[in-house]
Image: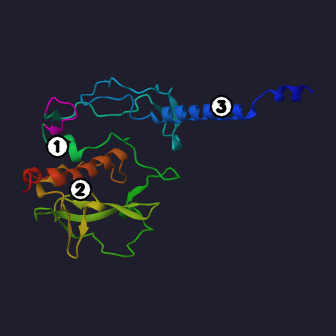
Amino acid sequence: MVGMEFFGDFDLASASIWLFWLFFALLIYYLQTENMREGYPLEDDDGNAAPNQGPFPLPSDKTFKLPHGAGELSYPSGARGDRDGLALDRTAKSAGSPYIPTGDPMVDGVGPASWAPRRDVPELDAHGHAKIKPMSLLEDFRISAGRDPRGKVVMAGDGEIVGRVVDMWIDVPEHMVRFLTIDLNPEGSGEQRLMPINMVRIKSDHVKVRSLYGHNFAGIPKVKAADQVTLLEEEKIMAWFAGGTLYAHDRRADPVI
């Protein structure tokens, strides 16, 4: 029979193993190129294209349709999304040398105070609504445990009283507090900022913020809307508080013996 004569001289085991290796090689190629949709092409410390880009080419653009009418994004076109012209200088000419800030690192957003250019839109839940909202606008939420920070004064890392907590921002789907609203005048001036809940400690009679000193609070990045916070605003606020751990005062950046 034709089938018997053909397979009688054909090594099916050898064909199977070679087909497996071919499939495995194609799988590695596919996974590696898909992994290169963000962070590529590679750059050196000065922002120039790195001489060794690796054996795999950049993949062709893939367009993602965002939910809730938020438009489209294509990668790897513009995938890096890096910030240009950062206020940093290299400490030496040799490759790999550390960089130091050339201005106010908290204002410039570098070093521990660095932030990523996330989209300037609020994070949405599965229904297309903003996830994080002020508790004062949520009738169904109340505090069920722990200390209520509202009404307590805020004490900076240098002991200065800088304001008073007037509201909390809730992650509605997660039922978690994400931010506290501080009025920068204990008597109530209307000048408000957001504080990440994980960067404060709620005491019995005050709220403590160790990472910032009194003069740093006025510089906390503002939010554009009173009822929502965008991903970019969250990023900058978190970077400000985290950066204050090192940059709130010059003596914090000095070496400790």
- The secondary structure that most of the magenta stretch takes on is loop
Q: Is residue 243 visible?
A: yes
Number of residues whose C-alpha sits closer than 10 Å to that of mark 1, classed few (under 14), some (14–19) or many (20 or more): many
Say what amino acid the circle numbered 2 marks.
Gln
Looking at the image, which is closer to me, 163 or 83? Answer: 83
What residue sits 57% from the left and 35% below the top? 27
Report helix, strand or loop for mark 3.
helix
Say what amino acid the circle numbered 1 marks.
Pro
Image quarter where the N terminus lies is top right
Residue at which label 2 appears: 192
Report helix, strand or loop for mark 1.
helix
Looking at the image, which is closer to me, 127 or 34? Answer: 34
Count of marks placed on residues: 3
| Label 2 to label 3: alpha-carbon separation | 66 Å
Give the answer, above or below, for where 13 lies relative to 168.
Answer: above
Image quarter where the C terminus lies is bottom left
